[in-house]
Image (cartoon, coloured by chain):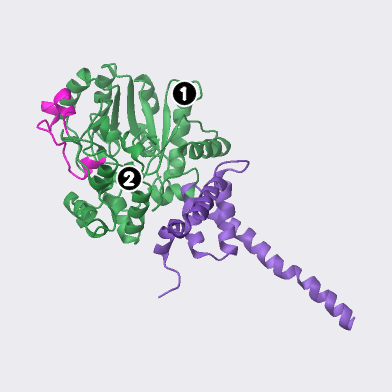
Chain colours: A purple, B green
Amino acid sequence: MSYYDPKDLRKFGDITEWSEELGTKYFDYYGKVFEDGALTAREKSLIALAVSHTEQCPYCIDAYTKDSLQRGVTKEEMMEAIHVGAAIRSGATLVHGVMMMNKVNKLDG
Amino acid sequence: MTKIKTQSLHKRHSELAQANRQLEILSNGIFRDGELPTFAEKITETGQFPLRPKKLEVLQINVGYMCNQVCEHCHVDAGPDRKEIMTWETMEQCLEVIRNTGAHTLDLTGGAPEMNPNFRRFVDEASKAGIQDFIVRSNLTIIRANKKYHDLPRFFKEHNVHVVSSMPHWTKGKTDKQRGDGVFDASIEALKMLNDVGYGLPDSDLRLDLVYNPSGAFLPGDQASMEKDFKKALMEDFGIQFHNLFAITNLPISRFLDYLIASDNYEDYMYQLVDAYNPSAVANVMCTNTISVSWDGWLYDCDFNQMLELKVDNKIQHIKDYNESLLNNRNIVISQHCFGCTAGAGSSCQGSVT
């Protein structure tokens, strides 16, 4: 058995039961965030999909893959969005290489 | 050329070709053990049971299940092998009703309605009845399928027909996956032919609407946003124009039910539908303003009930005995497939209902 059960995603709303005020505020906020605004809901869905991958959240990946499909997003668009996340994440690793270079130069330059 | 993607459930001798088997599946499992409420329980909770018709607005006539395509999710299980075709005798009975109905919309569907050998004669006669909105649901590719259909756009125009056509996506890949190889290109050509005679242009009275239904086990997105995306893409890529997009939810029957079960998506999909239940959609579901007539003249609350062989719950059950006021006094027949019409913004043959 896995720690992650896909069926648990359906119970996400239950978190409100143990802390009604915070849960309600969170879901109100969440709903508002994903409405059409300066960005379309479709664009937000793609951002959420990319972040779901960088966060490596299985629930979020399930949810925003489906959400993207519902908004007519193509698989090519989805994969490109994930590459954006991957590029930032690997970039965040690689940019630390400058720290390593600085250190090497100080210690052994 | 379009290429047939699959075979009908009937041709495959699938047990899901039987309406009873579909209804059994929809009543068992998660619905029998109480994991999910039945549709009757759900509408009882919101004080909407039994579902009753309002004023009749739409007379929908299915003139046959034969089709030149075999789409993956077809709720009719239509295809070239289906031989159920409305006879002229039944058409005459329909015409009698069309001349006297209080409905403002006549909606011809199939299969590919154009494949009925008496289709043009029927449209010719029906158009004289002066119905306000005369819809033909054309799958588009039929217009390109054979020379004898090439003049359909002009024929539709002559009869002031409102054309409603399926278009699952603005990209080739997603469209052909659902409807068969070559369907996207043929549909684009057909849309251009319709535009050429004036259909779908911004100020034109020749109405051309598109129907979007999802290509898999998910619900349609917001209709207005999808329409915007479709319009932008079809205009930029092909110079094509149309009026409105109807976003329709796939109901868990026939080939879509078969797909849901085979892909292990059935339970999740039913959860999605039940979770998205919207009582205000219930108030406007199409069965409350529609009568559906099958190729052999039987009467149903909607096209989906027709495919599940759930006739109207009324002593008038056939077009030959049609009586609008008697028919209006009935309870609508429901099962769990009805959750498909009440999810989110609701779904009907005219798109969202809220």
Q: Give percent across and percent down for residue A31.
A: 52, 47
Q: Residue at x 19, y 49 (%)?
A: B19
Relative side of B252 to B180, left or right: left
Q: Is residue A70 above or below residue B127?
A: below
Q: In the rendered image, which quarter contains the N terminus of chain A?
A: bottom left
Tell me the residue that label 1 is attached to. Answer: B198
Q: Residues within 10 Å of mark 1 (few under 14, many from 20)?
A: many
> What residue would you read off at disc 2?
B340
Q: Chain of mark 2?
A: B
Identified by mark 1, the residue type is Gly
Q: Position of residue B32 (x, y in %)?
A: 21, 57
Q: Nearer the viewer, mark 2 or mark 1?
A: 2
Amino acid bearing label 2: Gly
Q: CA distance from mark 2 to mark 1?
A: 34 Å
Mark 2 is surrounded, within 10 Å at the Cα level, by few (under 14), some (14 to 19) or many (20 or more) other residues, namely many
Magenta stretch containing residue B1, yes or no? Answer: no
**Camera sees residue B75:** no
In the picture, which quadrant includes the C terminus of chain A? bottom right
Residue positioned 45% across, 69% down in the render: A4
Q: Position of residue B225 (x, y in %)?
A: 51, 39
Residue at (24% x, 25% y) in the render: B122
Q: In the picture provided, is A108 more to the left or to the right than B83? A: right
Residue A78's tag is: none
Asked if residue B352 is positioned above or below residue A85 in the image, the reply reads above
B323 in relation to B261, above or below? above
Q: Report the span colored magenta.
A: B304-330
